[in-house]
Amino acid sequence: MSGRRIGFVEVGPRDGLQNEKTLVSTADKLELIRRSIAAGARRIEVTSFVNPKRVPQMADAEAVCAGLPDAAGVSYIGLVMNAKGAERAIATGRLHELGAVCVSTDGFAIANQAQTSDESLTAASSIIAMAKAAGLKGQVTIGASFGCPFEGEVSEDRVVAMAAALAKADPAEIALADTIGVADPAHVSRLVKRVVQAIAPLPVRVHFHNTRGTGNANVWAAIEAGASVVDAALGGLGGCPFAPGAAGNVASEDVVYMLHRAGVDTGMDLAQLIEANRWLSGVMDRKLPAMVAQAPAFPKSVQE
Ligand code: ZN
């Protein structure tokens, strides 16, 4: 593990903010994106193209895209659930990747995106095709891969079969998401290994929520099992409006601290993340769930 380099995706501007009741201004979202770039992020999920009535925080998707800074080597990701969202995302002309979402269970797929699980798989495959036709990357996340807020346990076989089916659409990567934060490291290790094998050579990305305190342990288990890209949100903000009880994403600064201490490189700068945490805490007017920024610097030189 030591000496490895993994990919890092900052999802704070989308997943971090989407469940916040107070609307964050477009200017502050763009500042969050600028600070993420300054901290080293080279892939950023900047917004989602969903019905603004369902997710009011994302109503300014087009305005966010219009304001994105030109940053060499940075890939901007727009999350989309259906063809209409993909058309909106492509029309901005500012994105490099479309992130499609399909869901392992009918219960959550219907609540999240008004599709059955199978319909979400078909929709994701066609979004990948639309992205590629527009000259963008298309990647896909399997939501509720480790547990469903409505149906409980999720069959590992079902998730592996979905990943194999999605691989036929030739996405840039496939992500497993623990949308409601119920996974444990043993489950993560088993499922990531199976999916890595099922879709090789496509990379596996992982997306964890720290609802029950297992988030960072799950990140570690996933990397050990062969995942090569990790999602995280600055400050550990996050949640899902359609998944009862979903809490924050794993925090960028906590994940980066853990991985760097363990000798795994992310390309991120911890000191800049901590500075960004303080700024974001001011914007949200509260202490954020992330832990590293609340602790004394260790070793001292890293966070000074
Ligand atoms: Zn999430």
Image (spheres, rainbow, N blue to C red):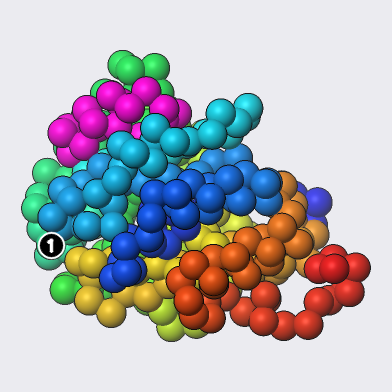
Magenta residues span 82-99
Task: Specify whether tag 1 is near ligand 1 (CB below 8 Å).
Answer: no
> Where is the C terminus found, in terms of image quarters?
bottom right
Answer left or right for 4 relative to 72.
right
In magenta segment, residue 171: no
Residue at point 41%, 27% (across, down) = 94
In the figure, residue 217 lies in which quadrant? Answer: bottom right
Q: Is residue 214 above or below residue 46?
A: below
Residue at point 54%, 71% (across, down) = 282
> Where is the N terminus found, in terms of image quarters?
bottom right
How far from the left and from the top, in percent, is residue 262?
77, 65
Please indicate, yes or no, whether residue 106 appears anywhere in the rendered image. Answer: no
How far from the left and from the top, in percent, is residue 99?
35, 40
Answer left or right for 110 relative to 162.
left
Q: Which residue is mark 1?
A: 111
Answer left or right for 115 relative to 270.
left
- Check disc 1 and report its element: helix, strand or loop: helix
In the figure, residue 57 lies in which quadrant? Answer: bottom left
